[in-house]
Image: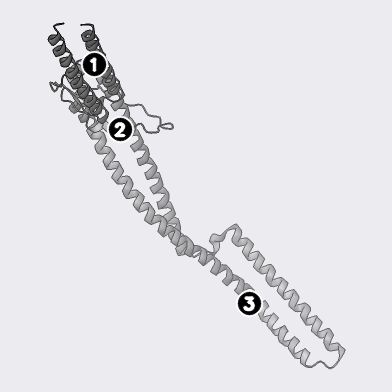
Amino acid sequence: MNKLLKLLGFYLLSVLIFSCIYWSQFRKNTSAFIIEKQMNEITNNIYKMPYDNLIYKTPDYKIPFNINDFNNILKSKFDSISMLAFKLDSINNYEKSVKELRDSLQNRVEKSITSNIDLLIAQETKDLINQKDSILKIIDFLITKKENSNIDVAIVNEQVKIAYIKLKIASIELDIRNVALRNNSLFADKELALKHDSLQSEYLTNSDSISIYSNSLKILNREIYTLTKKYHANRIEKVSYWDFLYFSILASTSNNFGDMTPNSKNIKIAICFQILFSILFIGVLVDHIIKSINRGNW
């Protein structure tokens, strides 16, 4: 009889342990169980998102226990999220194409600036370069007619003129490039520059829209998360530990009336272990009773 009492006590202890496991899993996520045929379908995989810099107060909704009523509250929000996500995706794609076109125009504008600077330098130094070429011809002529020392002096004088012209050309080029550094838009192709500025403005507008839509998505996700958290808390308040003790007793006897159904892989694994343990225990218990009866100790 003492051994029988020990077996029964061990069985009751296992029932209590498994009921605690079910209760703790339910408190972590109420989607682990379908209670009264109410399943948390939509909010099962909602996770906490980073809202550190987002200031927003969730509207005070009355949270129902019935999952269908709760999902009706969330339906419009999920529809809004789908619509915003579609718009955000469209704007992102459009922004990408605008950025590619803007960058292409930027390269063309930079090339036009370089080309116009070189063209202006060539125009401003054209006369000086012609003078330099004329002096070089004179020097070549003097070298071929080298008859006395006076020609050497003339050649040196012409070379000094060339050095002066080179210095003047360098000074003009430096002045033009300094102006370009201060305001290179002066040398840009006007039509290309206007197109680039227009695309840049459009790009910034799209960026603002993306920021607005992204912020709206964060707000909606935060609201859904908060509502879901309240919904789970509401279910926890209305389901007590005794409900899971009742479920554990039914599971140990392989019975279930359908009012509580497992909806989690971990719970299903635990129930399998409990049922196998219960079958093993019943076998041991029956064996012990039969042996006691045969020995006349019953």
Q: Which residue is mark 3?
A: 126
Q: Which residue is mark 1?
A: 15
The circle on residue 46 is: 2
Residue drawn at 45 percent across, 56 percent down: 197
The circle on residue 180 is: none
Q: Secondary structure at mark 3?
A: helix
Q: Nearer the viewer, residue 180 or 26?
A: 26
Q: Secondary structure at mark 2?
A: loop
What is the residue that sits farthest to the front in this orientation? Answer: 295
Asked whether the beta carbons under mark 2 and mark 1 sit within 8 Å of each other, the answer is: no
Residue drawn at 31 percent across, 25 percent down: 229
The three-letter amino acid code for the residue at tag 2 is Ile
Separation of residues labelled 2 and 1 (CA atoms) = 32 Å
Q: Which numbered disc, 3 or 1, marks the residue that appears first in the sequence?
A: 1
In the rendered image, residue 92, in percent from the top left (x then y), is placed at 36, 49
In the rendered image, residue 219, in percent from the top left (x then y), is placed at 35, 33
